[in-house]
Image: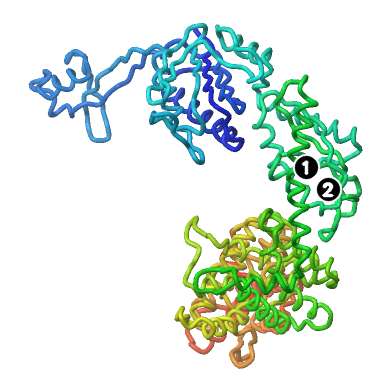
Amino acid sequence: MANTFLLEIGTEELPADFVPSALRQLEQRIRSDLKDLRLAHGELSVTGTPRRLLVVVRELIDSQPDLEEDRKGPPVSQALVDGRPGPAAIGFAKRCGVDPEDLQPKDTPKGPCLFARVKTPGQPSSALLGECVPRWIDALQGRRFMRWGCGEQRFSRPVRWLVVMLGDAVIPVTLDTADPVVTSGRTSRGHRLHEQLQEVNSAEDLLRQLNDAGVMVNREQRAETIRAAIVSESERCDGQADCPESLFQELVDLVESPSVLKGRIADRFLELPPEVIVTVMQAHQRYVPLRIPQAVSDPLQLQARNVLKPEFLLVSNGVESASDTIVSGNQRVLGARLADAEFFLNVDRRQSSEQRRQSLERVTFAEGLGSLFDRSERISWVMDQLLLALQLEGTVASHARRAAHLCKHDLVCQMVGEFPELQGLMGGKYLLEEGEPRDVALAVAEHYLPAGSGDALPASDAGALLALAERIELLLSIFAKGQRPTGSSDPYALRRAGNGIVQILWNRGWQLPLQSLFTTASTHWAERFPAFNVEAEALANDLGQLLCQRMVSQFEDDGFAIDLVQAVCGEGVSTERLLEDPVDARDRLLLLKTLRESGRLQDLQAVVQRASRLAEKGDLPPSKLSVEGIVDASLFDSPSEAALLVELEALRPLAQAKDYERLAQRLQGAARALEAFFDGSDSVMVMAEDPSVRRNRLNLLGVLRNQASVLARFDHIQS
């Protein structure tokens, strides 16, 4: 017989981020346990709302099948005495619950042993599931679990009821460490604003009652309903919904009976910057702003009037008859929030950005590293080094220096104090409002970009320079202090800062000698912070290693094949080579990817690796790219040697100029000369008896290997 198993864990309102996580955990654990318990079943569905986690397993068998298994016993030589079961066999049979005469000998890798056929009767599914349910609840993990009352039960929110049934029968389950004690029964609860449900007789009965009580228990159905309603209401308002996926998923898990309602922003608040209104709506109130279609996106926009529609959307969990009251209440809450923002904006406008910058002296950046004002000064110093290294002058340089001078002023403003998400952005807006050049204001607004994986990069040169200076200063200061990212601990987001540096350089195409910059800056930091006892060379090397790791990590995140990444950045490639021009590494990796996609890489790899394997028997240093002074043509005794020399002389200028595309093409062309050198009618024995001839031939192959290594370490590439 098979029945439907039902489990409903009823709770107070769960945090939105816990629900999807708990559903994944439940499904994985239940599938695993049912398999281990030999309980065959049909469809398993796990879903939930803010007040319940619901599991339905269809066609679950009523009882385990009996289990028959052969258990291995003692060796025959020890178990049988004169062909009859001895003490060892009798003891083994007793443990297995069988007659000693029923034991059977079987061959094993260690010789013949006695085996017992043991039959274990299957247990009722209801008994097994009754034991499992408390374990499933206790095994769920999440953030900020709690205890309630005087009990010891831990969960995301207090558990208030349990429905555990197999078919129409209740499975007795008790959470005796909860306060009050929770016992399974037939009683569930619907929407808070609906009447109590009747007794539950089956899974289908519960699903029907929940639907009648206004609970859309299926999470996927709830998501589709909300998404369709948002699209419909947006079109009705001639707006474009600004609903990031993270906000949407949160909305799905905040309601049981979703309906999308329309509210309105008071006209005076449209004078606020659009990011302020959007932040209040999305991050604080979980509303969906509506943008004006085709509105120009400008991070320095001072007013929302030409960016946002006056309407906004909210996802309600109330009854339809209360919609007007719900909208009115939410509009009042939003109005209060925006009135606070309006007040902060007016207060900030009474003080200039230069005055705020001076106030940074009163705010500590980090222990031993001085104030935010001191940090601002260090960022300006790094900016000067960047401009010098990149040889940038003119308006870009002057705007970048001014932006570095003012970049942290908004950290002490009222608006950023209330809305930290707007740091940098508000600073740029205030600067533009005060009459600073737009490029200066834009650089300040962009200098926290990219904020994370997949985030936008600075769009302006000055913004990119300031973003680099800010991150380089952070790495220098925290590393000089002696702190490093360890495992999952990275409180200053140093790895993210490193990723940002390489992403910006790749995006702008700037050939910035990072290792040289780190060397100069580390000496300056050692002088600036004598209390830290900084060893400048060690600091520069540590920073270089971090950036190399970040390059590898970012390449892999960008989807490049791991073997190609290792060929460009892996073992055998010096830190100095990578960091003297990070853009060069990306260019080479892109070329390798193109060669692989076009089918040319394998042939090129075969040429280089064959030469490299023999070249290892020589002693030619990797830096030698020319045959001059190391290959003597008078020692040639075959035309194939002369032909290979011609190829090497043609490859030399391409390798020295780092003309990678033509270098790759010419290396492919060298395949014929190398084939003749090894296998043709004029082939030679590289490991000749004459030491001079042997060294001459090994040097030919060594130069070819070195020239190819300018592009990549081909020994890391998989065929």
Q: Secondary structure at mark 2?
A: helix
Q: Secondary structure at mark 1?
A: helix
Amino acid carrying mark 1 in the image: Gly
Where's residue 415, x and y in %?
72, 57
Amino acid carrying mark 2 in the image: Phe
Where's residue 655, x and y in %?
69, 79
Q: Earlier in the sequence, mark 2 or mark 1?
A: 2
| Residue 87 horizontal side relative to residue 611, left or right | left
Mark 1 lies on residue: 335
Identify the image quadrant of residue 24: top right
Q: Residue at x 71, y 39 (%)?
A: 286
Identify the image quadrant of residue 85: top left
**Is 535 rendered above or below residue 18?**
below
Mark 2 lies on residue: 269
Identify the image quadrant of residue 110: top left
Q: Nearer the viewer, residue 454 or 67?
A: 454
Q: Residue furthest left?
A: 82
Q: Residue at x 54, y 18 (%)?
A: 57
| Residue 267 horizontal side relative to residue 584, left or right | right
Regarding residue 679, the answer to whether it shows in the image is no
**Is 623 rendered above or below residue 82?**
below
Where's residue 219, x and y in %?
66, 27
